Image (cartoon, rainbow, N blue to C red):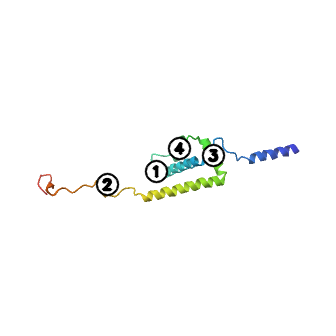
Amino acid sequence: MRIFIFGMFLFCLGACSGDHEPKKLIPQEKMEDILWDMMQADQFVQQYLKKDSSVHNLKGETMKMYDEIFAIYHVTKDEFKDNFQYYTSHPLLTKIIFDSLFARGVRQRGDVYKHPVNPPARQLLPKQAPPAPGRLKLRTDSLRRPI
């Protein structure tokens, strides 16, 4: 009986120490970038693909985008899941990551409002000097009469 209780104690002790780092720990900065791109992909699906009548499987489209993001960062889906679980099991690390993501969003939103999307029309036309007084051409209509 003592051996059984001691074995259960060791089993519980081993089960509670599941706080080990993943085999391939993704650095915080890279994890922030991956999560940022995943959030951008989610927003794209919700704002654009949801309105597209030719797209019927939004979850599948989101997963395709996630796979592309994982390929960009050279991370597999399982590695990401292990790392995400590791970071969420450490609240201080998770807080740092999500605070950085929030700050990045606020910064980008501020940048959008600083710069106009379309410059005013007068900036689109090149500046030209007015024609010389003797070189004015008369405009004509389709019958070649002066207007």
* Percent coordinates x, y for residue 98 in the rendering: 58, 54
The C terminus: image quadrant? bottom left
Marks 4/3: CA distance? 15 Å
Q: Earlier in the sequence, mark 4 or mark 2?
A: 4
Q: Amino acid at mark 3?
A: Asn
Q: Indicate the amino acid at tag 2.
A: Leu
- Number of other residues with Cα within 10 Å of mark 3, as a class: few under 14, some 14 to 19, many 20 or more: many
Mark nearer the viewer, 1 or 4: 4
How busy is the neighbourhood of tag 2: few (under 14 within 10 Å), some, or many (20 plus)? few
Q: Earlier in the sequence, mark 1 or mark 4?
A: 1
- Judging by the rendered image, the residue that carries numbered circle 4 is 69
- Position of residue 129 measured from the top left corner of the image (x, y, whole percent): 23, 56
Work out whether mark 2 precedes mark 1 in sequence or the reverse, and give the earlier one. Answer: 1
Q: Which residue is mark 2?
A: 124
Q: Are the residues tagged 3 and 1 within 8 Å (C-beta)?
A: no
**Residue 140 falls in image quadrant:** bottom left
Please determine whether, in this image, residue 81 is positioned above or below residue 106. above
Question: Of the residues shown, which amino acid type is indicated by label 1?
Answer: Tyr
- Residues at marks 3 and 1, CA–CA distance in whole angstroms: 30 Å
The local crowd at label 4, few if under 14, some if 14 to 19, many if 20 or more residues have their Cα within 10 Å, is many
Whole-number angstrom distance, CA of label 2 to CA of label 1: 29 Å
The amino acid sitting under disc 4 is: Ile
Helix, strand or loop at mark 1: helix
Q: Residue at x 58, y 47 (%)?
A: 31
Q: Residue at x 54, y 40 (%)?
A: 71
Q: Nearer the viewer, mark 2 or mark 1?
A: 2
* Residue matched to label 1: 48
Q: Find disc 3 in the rendering and name its residue.
A: 83
